[in-house]
Image (cartoon, rainbow, N blue to C red):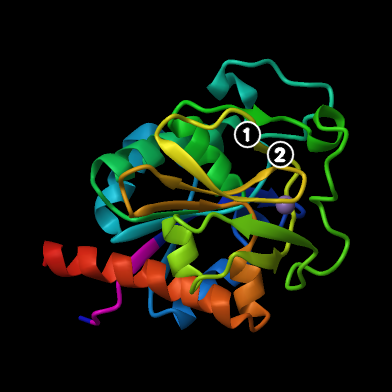
Amino acid sequence: MSDRPIVGVTCGFMKKNDFVQGPYTHEDYVKSLISAGAVPIILPIAPDNVTENYEGLCDGFLFSGGSDVDPRFYGESPSPQIYAFDTERDASELLLMRRVIAAGKPVFGICRGLQVMNVAFGGTLIQDLPSEMKQALQHTQKVPRTKTSHSVRVLEDSRLFTLLNGRKTLYVNSLHHQAIKTLAAELRAVAFAPDGIIEAAEHVNNDRILGIQWHPESMAAGGDALMNHLFRCFVEKCARIKEKTV
Ligand SMILES: [Mn+2]
């Protein structure tokens, strides 16, 4: 057996045509996990009695990006501006998130993954950034996803600041339609865009739980050394969990 930790990656469902349809996640998650030393496995959207089994299969979990979150899961009705959502994916990921956190496994939430994390802990989301926040900057960048477009400010007393080798500001990519509105009480916002949008959050006392609103997997795939380092830190956490369980 290899000593590489196994990281489960959540995915969406994509139908391209009648011949091509099924589980989908961007290859950059897979590439970045492999180069950081993990064995990635894709976890298809499934009913509860299957999703329940995912927790025990993996040493850590990456909740990936994707479509908007169904607002019923945070007690709201859909705004006219909300994009298509996938209620089954949301239900499956919220169940998985709660089980994984209860089991003490490391969680890396990326983009929608951060939003699902916030909803799982009781927070709410901005359903449509441009209409709900008039002074918002462009969070759906027009440049390729490996490139950066807006800056973020990182709090110096955060764990993220340490993971980013003490960087107070950095440029990141931005490909999100939604964002955190009310932050869950158990999470702490640790990075902000210039318009105030929360760009990262970590658990107040569990150092295995981190969520990022930008896409470090695509910056890493584009050669960004700091984002590669962030992935290695996550995979090392997963490896330590694996050692304890074998
Ligand atoms: Mn952004």
Is residue 27 visible in the rendered image? The answer is no
Is residue 71 visible in the rendered image? The answer is yes
Q: Main SS type for the magenta part?
A: loop
Residue appearing at x 59%, y 68% in the figure: 217
Residue type at the position of mark 1: Val
Residue 117: % across, % down: 48, 40
**Which residue in the protein does label 2 denote?**
178
Residue 131: % across, % down: 86, 30
Q: Is residue 3 magenta?
A: yes
The crowding category of the residue bearing disc 1, from other C-alpha atoms within 10 Å (few below 14, some 14 to 19, many at least 20), is many
Q: Which mark is residue 69?
A: 1
* Tag 2 and tag 1, C-beta contact below 8 Å: yes
Q: Is residue 117 magenta?
A: no
The crowding category of the residue bearing disc 2, from other C-alpha atoms within 10 Å (few below 14, some 14 to 19, many at least 20), is many
Between tags 2 and 1, which lies in front? 2
Secondary structure at badge 2 equals loop
Q: In which quarter of the image is the N terminus?
A: bottom left
Q: Is residue 29 left or right of residue 103?
A: right
From this view, report whether residue 230 is shown above or below residue 17: below
Give the mark nearest the N terminus, 2 or 1: 1
Q: From which residue to which does the magenta span run?
A: 2-7
Viewer-proximal residue among 18 and 159: 159
Residue appearing at x 48%, y 77% in the figure: 229
